[in-house]
Image (tube, rainbow, N blue to C red):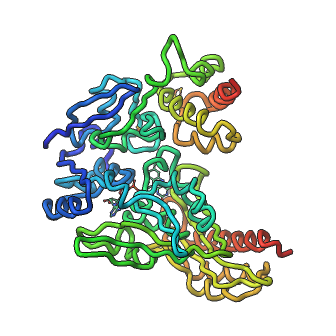
């Protein structure tokens, strides 16, 4: 980052705000390699100011709220449109009911001002290893729908992330929505550790989705953020949790496996060693919380 | 590059203008539209000095492009109250000595007026969470929280 550049205006570009999907793909075509998509702009504007990108055209998705926005449930699937903002997600009753972990993460993104405009699609497309929406979606078994000129395809959220700041989008494709299985009886929780409470990237985040019947966990998924090149599904830990007794001893074992699966780096926020420790502590905390919320002594 | 024609509402008045595509809403409001209450601190969404209401949600205007206001409703602190008729949060800020240098204050008033209107039953912890996007390097926030609570009580 070279702060002096903030004094100079962002190098100029053409601004286009298509009104239909057909116009959108037309706009992509017309600008070859030189366009950038803007949704909420909370990542793109910073990238423009840092000169990390210098597009010929900025293509705004804001007029496509009808096609790419909204939150609804049908046929057992909770669909969250790419343009849903974190404020909308935070206060949506369907999200509260079927995807509590996502609601918790949304309420912790940035600040009120950021949540008012930052979108779910933008959070995924930026593909930060610390993207707060990712662990809840991965834990809930969500998939992401990508839309291009010649049709759409659907990927599990964990496969959408291909590396730090890298994703599965092809040039000219957009994220159109996220689909979350809306199962009754599945509860999901999220927590994180960060250097302060508000307006800071997560040092480590953990989300777990599971059902509990007769003192045992049903199908369970543990997902981790900011401890690998991408957000990850902790497979061994998830397998160990599935079908196990909902007890403090099991929480310890599942959390230890999650910490083993984490492949963190050291950076300004924490050392790799401390991050692994945090994965253990946060995973155990979430499982104990689920056990106590299920009323198991 | 080509200027962009936008029609939007600024502080309740309809406005049409030609804006630079690469100008932020913050710079446009401060330098072009004459709403000089909108301050630039960090220019990266961290400090909240540039907070305005966009369709009745607080946003950091330094992260919005001017052309993005097409068809939308923008309110700055100028639209929330005047010297003669301050809004309840502005009046309470005066009574609680909640202002020191003043740089953060327009953004702070925009956020807290929104909290007063939309989350009037917010707990202290919730108030702190909602105002965490407005940094104040002078006051230590306590007077501002007291002022908000007084304004909510009315
Ligand atoms: C002060 C501040 C605090 C922040 N705090 C957090 C935090 O706590 N947690 C966190 O996870 N993030 C945080 N962020 C990062 C950012 O706010 C989020 O990643 C946000 O969700 C991005 O969404 P957006 O709509 O603003 O994206 P934009 O900036 O509009 O776009 C981001 C990127 O995705 C592309 N894009 C956007 N939408 C689509 C789409 N539908 N299809 C294809 N490509 C698309 C854009 O081209 C761009 O490359 C913070 C940012 C700031 C400035
Ligand atoms: S100037 Fe916009 S948040 Fe600091
Ligand atoms: S009064 Fe000086 S920054 Fe808030």
As rendered, which of A73 and A31 lies closer to the eye? A73
Q: Residue at x 60, y 63 (%)?
A: A192
Q: Residue at x 62, y 88 (%)?
A: A239
x and y percent of residue A132 in the render?
51, 62
Where ligand 1 lies, by quadrant? bottom left
x and y percent of residue B133 in the render?
52, 42
Residue A263 seen in the current view = no
x and y percent of residue A184 in the render?
65, 75
A93 to A145, vertically: above or below: above
B3 to B97, vertically: above or below: below
Quadrant showing the N terminus of chain B: top left
Q: Residue at x 77, y 86 (%)?
A: A245
Residue A182 seen in the current view = yes
As rendered, which of B61 and A175 lies closer to the eye? A175
Q: Residue at x 42, y 39 (%)?
A: B54
How many numbered discs, if any? 0
Residue farthest toward the right in the current orientation of the protein: A297
Left-right relation of A164 to A50: right
Residue A127 found in image quarter: bottom left
x and y percent of residue B40 in the render?
38, 33
Residue B63 found in image quarter: top left
């Amino acid at each position: 980052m070279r702060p002096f550049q903030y004094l100079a205006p962002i190098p100029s570009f053409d601004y286009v705000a298509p009104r239909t999907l057909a116009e959108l793909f037309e706009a992509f075509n017309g600008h070859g390699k030189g366009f950038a998509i803007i949704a909420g702009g909370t990542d793109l504007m910073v990238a423009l100011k840092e000169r990390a990108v210098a597009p010929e055209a900025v293509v705004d998705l804001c007029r496509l709220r009808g096609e790419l926005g909204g939150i609804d449930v049908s046929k057992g699937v909770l669909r969250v449109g790419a343009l849903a903002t974190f404020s909308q997600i935070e206060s949506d009753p369907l999200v509260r009911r079927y995807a509590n972990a996502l609601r918790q993460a949304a309420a912790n993104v940035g600040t009120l001002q950021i949540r008012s405009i930052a979108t779910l699609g933008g959070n995924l497309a930026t593909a930060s290893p610390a993207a707060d929406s990712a662990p809840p979606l991965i834990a809930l078994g969500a998939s992401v729908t990508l839309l291009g000129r010649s049709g759409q395809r659907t990927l599990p959220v964990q496969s959408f992330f291909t590396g730090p700041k890298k994703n599965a989008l092809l040039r000219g494709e957009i994220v159109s929505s996220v689909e979350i299985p809306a199962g009754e009886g599945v509860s999901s929780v999220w927590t994180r550790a960060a250097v302060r409470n508000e307006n800071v990237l997560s040092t480590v985040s953990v989300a777990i989705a599971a059902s509990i019947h007769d003192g045992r966990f049903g199908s369970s998924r543990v997902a981790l953020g900011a401890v690998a090149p991408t957000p990850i599904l902790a497979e061994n830990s998830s397998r160990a949790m599935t079908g196990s007794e909902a007890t403090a001893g099991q929480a310890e074992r599942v959390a230890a496996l999650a910490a083993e699966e984490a492949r963190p780096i050291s950076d300004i926020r924490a050392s790799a060693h401390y991050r692994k420790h945090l994965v253990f502590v946060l995973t155990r905390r979430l499982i104990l919380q689920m056990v106590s919320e299920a009323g198991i002594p | 590059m080509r200027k962009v024609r936008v029609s939007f509402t600024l502080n309740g008045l309809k406005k049409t203008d030609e804006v630079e595509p690469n100008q932020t809403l913050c710079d446009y409001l401060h330098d072009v539209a004459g709403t000089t209450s909108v301050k630039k601190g960090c220019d990266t969404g961290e400090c909240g000095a540039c907070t305005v209401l966009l369709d009745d949600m607080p946003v950091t205007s330094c992260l919005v492009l001017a052309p993005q206001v097409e068809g939308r409703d923008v309110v700055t602190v100028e639209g929330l109250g005047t010297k003669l008729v301050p809004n309840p949060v502005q009046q309470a800020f005066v009574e609680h000595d909640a202002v020191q240098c003043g740089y953060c204050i327009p953004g702070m008033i925009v956020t807290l007026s929104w909290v007063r209107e939309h989350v009037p039953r917010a707990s202290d912890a919730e108030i702190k969470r909602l105002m965490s996007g407005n940094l104040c390097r002078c006051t230590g926030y306590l007077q501002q929280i007291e002022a908000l609570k007084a304004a909510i009580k009315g």
